[in-house]
Amino acid sequence: MKQERSDPWIINKKVETNNFLNIVPDKYSFITVRREKSGGFLFNPYLFNEVPLNETEIRILELCNGFLLVKDIINTISDEFFLSGKDAETLTINALNNFSKHFAINCKQEKRAGEFKIKKNVSKGKCKGQDRTHGIYHYSAPLSVIFEITHRCNLGCKHCLVDAGKPLENELSLKEIKKIIDQLVEMKVFNVNFGGGEPFLRDDFFDILEYASKSNIGIVFSTNGFLVNDEVLDKLENIKTFAVQISVDGLEKTHDEFRGVKGSFKRAVWALKKFSDKGYYTIMSTMMLKKNIGELEFLIKLCLSMGISSFKLSTFMPAGRGNKNINDFLLTPSDLKSIAVRMLKQKKEYIEKINMDINGTFPWLIENKPKKLLEGFKERYERIGCSAGMSSLTISPNGDVYPCPFLRNYPAGNLCSDKLKDIWENSDVFDVFRNIDRTKLKGKCGTCGYMPYYCQGGCRAAAFLQTGDFYAEDPNCWYGCNLP
């Protein structure tokens, strides 16, 4: 469950200098610090956000160990980065305030017992993450992982991307899943979304969550909500879970028709309300389809009435079972433009009440103007694409690893035979996603001024699934479309 927190400690420059310099910053044990090629991240599993840090900031955080006074940290930063004492002090103050804002440090009056010798900062620039072909940078490990623990499902959703129903052959055992979780922890993956199928159909799902919760990984799980009851809620009470995502794809009649089971809407809404009441970060996830686009505002009002944290819109992808229902579900770019206009209005109206995740509607086409590609940033913009293979991946119930959850014909490896670190660093499939060349993009995506700054070339999976061409223009993008 979401944990209550007190207000952060913020450094006040008016505090007497001597008192300030003798404060002892100590990083909380639940904070994960991860170095990258340049700088890195801190991750707080209770706030569920990765905070990017530059090289100086990450070094300061490493020195917040309970053994050093602020003045010791300032002196170390001054020496290692060849800064004046004044500049080092300013950087340290700003960094400590930033860490405190994200509840990463506890500031004490006394040092920890024992001795500590400052080790030279030998990690600078040593992190792996360089692509083997074109030298385009990717993260040293995923930031997030989708972990499908079963394809067994109690509903028959017509748009299911994995065609869930019966379990896959050779689905991972609890022992195998625990070993994979150990690898995720070792690689310092920040968050994992456990899903399916329907994860609650696994008898050992609570064991999986409990095992994962012993680490500092942020935990989310996705469910249809049908099997959630008071007994389930009681079992989850003491398991450290940050967020729950439940799909609601329309009002009652529409939702039940999509799901194939009468009463599934009521169960989903009941579960969302219960999780919300218990303090979880709750996400209502809605896939935009022809038959539900007129109900989106009603779903937002439903979220508001239940205190739901986030309303997330997803674009239909013709994969899995959805491939059999393309004509019934697929929206036109003009449809998506109309939805974007409506959803931006809703987002503005309810900005203080609910998070609106509407990126699937291409809102930046309304909010921003296209930009000219900046000179001097050729490498930065040469590689385009989404997070697939760069900062995220998907694990299937049999251990197959995919850069993209929508392209199932291209496994990068299998965790029953390979280590995740080896797959991440050496798979040719990941190389393909890490080397999507913007100069090969076709249609309007190839020349669009939004491409490098907002959409990074659009969804390559959508292009491939609808056209068979990985470099075709994103068929969902409505840039240049007029409203009907």
Image (tube, rainbow, N blue to C red):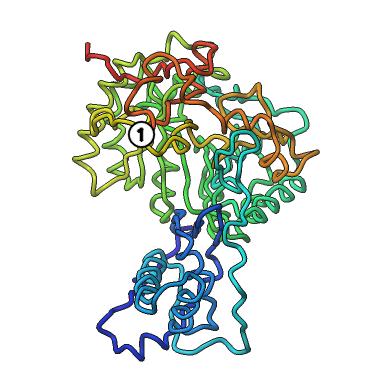
Three-letter amino acid code of the residue under disc 1: Tyr
- Residue 201 falls in which quadrant of the image? top right
Q: Position of residue 39 (x, y in %)?
A: 50, 57
Residue receiving disc 1: 454
Q: How many marks?
A: 1
Query: 151 or 404: nearer the eye?
Result: 404
Vertically, is 352 above or below 240? above
Give residue 231's position: percent from left, percent from top.
56, 50
Instruction: Using a 10 Å C-alpha cutoff, classify the residue at mark 1 as few (fewer than 14 neighbours), some (14 to 19) or many (20 or more).
Output: some
Kindly indicate the quadrant of the structure image that contains residue 429: top right
In this rendering, is residue 239 above or below 80?
above
- Residue located 61% across and 54% down the image: 127
Residue 361, percent from left and from top: 33, 27
Can see residue 367? yes
Q: Which quarter of the figure has residue 424?
A: top right
Q: Position of residue 283 (x, y in %)?
A: 41, 42
Q: Residue at x 41, y 29 (%)?
A: 314
Viewer can see residue 239: no
Q: Residue at x 49, y 60 (%)?
A: 42
Secondary element at tag 1 = helix
Q: Is 468 displayed left or right of 247 in the figure?
A: right
